[in-house]
Image (cartoon, helix red, strand yellow):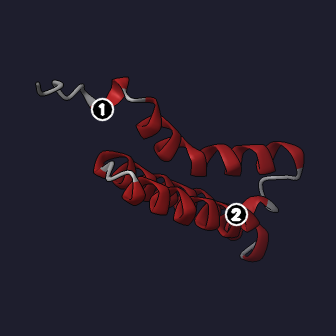
Amino acid sequence: MDVPESTWWVDPMVWLGLLQGGAIWLVMAIYLSVSAAWISLACGGLIGFFLYLVALGYEDYRFAKATLWGVVINMTLSSVSAMFAFIQ
């Protein structure tokens, strides 16, 4: 008996992988400052790496792909923060 695959926006693990990087950046931007939130790249990258390994361990490739996108989102937001911190 095959279980029908649901769409990606219904899967909570996809949302975890997708939003983990942005959430880490947002928490750091609120509690520290936007210009100090560039350091979230290290945290988001490490957490994303371990979430990626978990996704591969469970063979959930949709979760793995969403985690990679979450790290890309974190990299983008961290780059904006780094511009505020170091270029001004």
- Give the residue type that dot 2 points to: Cys
Mark 1 lies on residue: 8
For the view shown, which residue lies furthest in the right direction?
32
Q: Is residue 65 left or right of residue 45?
A: left
| Residue 58: x %, y % from top left | 38, 51
Q: Quarter of the image containing the N terminus?
A: top left
| Residue 74: x %, y % from top left | 57, 57
Mark 2 lies on residue: 43
Residue 22, label in figure: none
| Residue 19: x %, y % from top left | 54, 42
Q: Nearer the viewer, residue 47 or 2?
A: 2
Q: Are marks 1 and 2 in contact (CB under 8 Å)?
A: no
User: The residue tagged with tag 1: helix, strand or loop?
Assistant: helix
| Residue 7: x %, y % from top left | 24, 27
Q: Residues within 10 Å of mark 2 (few under 14, many from 20)?
A: some
**Can see residue 84?**
no
Return the disc, 1 or 2, that comes first in the chain's sequence: 1
Q: In this view, does 68 lie to the left or right of 43?
A: left
Q: Quadrant of residue 86?
A: bottom right
**Can see residue 24?**
yes
Q: Residue at x 70, y 63 (%)?
A: 43
Q: Which residue is drawn at 18% across and 25% down?
A: 3
Q: Which of 39 and 83 is in front in this view?
A: 39
Q: Which residue is drawn at 59% across and 56% down?
A: 77
Q: In this view, does 71 lie to the left or right of 61?
A: right
For the view shown, which residue lies furthest in the bottom direction?
86
- Give the residue type that dot 1 points to: Trp
Q: Distance between the residues labelled 1 and 2?
A: 25 Å
